[in-house]
Amino acid sequence: MTDAISKFTRQAGVPNSTADKASQSKVSAGRSDQSKASTSTDEVILSKAAESAMKSNDFDSTKVDEIKRQISEGKYPLDSKVIAKNFVALESMID
């Protein structure tokens, strides 16, 4: 495993400094504290815009059905250049 900061290689899972050992002991102590703590539940609060978007059906179901039919019949037009450009744009967001 290569250390991201120093670029030196070390065996995975082996502490290389006093700070690593201290950090590991804090994590271990935190784990035992978590088992004693009571369980809680998380709550998701949506914005008004998200709530209204989930309630409304702002799409043309007949158009969707027509596209599905064309795809199943192999008649839906595909532009390979547009598809390739979109893949490149997606990959550039990953890097």
Image (cartoon, rainbow, N blue to C red):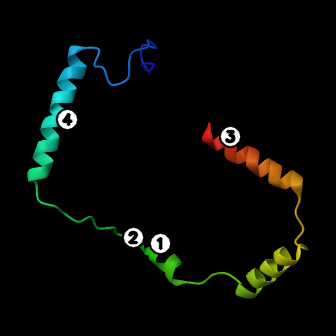
Q: Secondary structure at mark 3?
A: helix
Which circle's residue, 4 or 3, is located before the other in the chain? 4
From the image, tell me which residue sits under label 1.
50
From the image, tell me which residue sits under label 3.
92
Q: CA distance from mark 4 to mark 3?
A: 36 Å
In the rendered image, the residue lying farthest to the left is 36
Which circle's residue, 3 or 2, is located before the other in the chain? 2
Q: Closer to the observer: label 2 or label 4? A: 4
Q: Amino acid at mark 4?
A: Val
Query: Is residue 95 found left or right of 31 in the rendered image?
Result: right
Q: Position of residue 59 (x, y in %)?
A: 67, 81
Q: How many marks?
A: 4
Q: Position of residue 62 (x, y in %)?
A: 75, 88
Q: Closer to the observer: label 3 or label 1? A: 3
Q: Secondary structure at mark 2?
A: loop
Q: Closer to the observer: label 4 or label 3? A: 4
Q: Position of residue 89 (x, y in %)?
A: 72, 46
Check whether the beta carbons of the residues at disc 1 and disc 2 lie within 8 A of each other.
yes
Label 3 crowd (10 A; few <14 / some 14-19 / many >=20): few
Which circle's residue, 3 or 1, is located before the other in the chain? 1
Q: CA distance from mark 1 to mark 4?
A: 37 Å
Reply above or below: 52 against 47. Answer: below
From the image, tell me which residue sits under label 4.
27
Q: CA distance from mark 3 to mark 1?
A: 28 Å
Q: CA distance from mark 1 to mark 2?
A: 6 Å
Q: Amino acid at mark 1?
A: Ala
Q: Amino acid at mark 2?
A: Leu
State the residue at coordinates (63%, 43%). Answer: 93
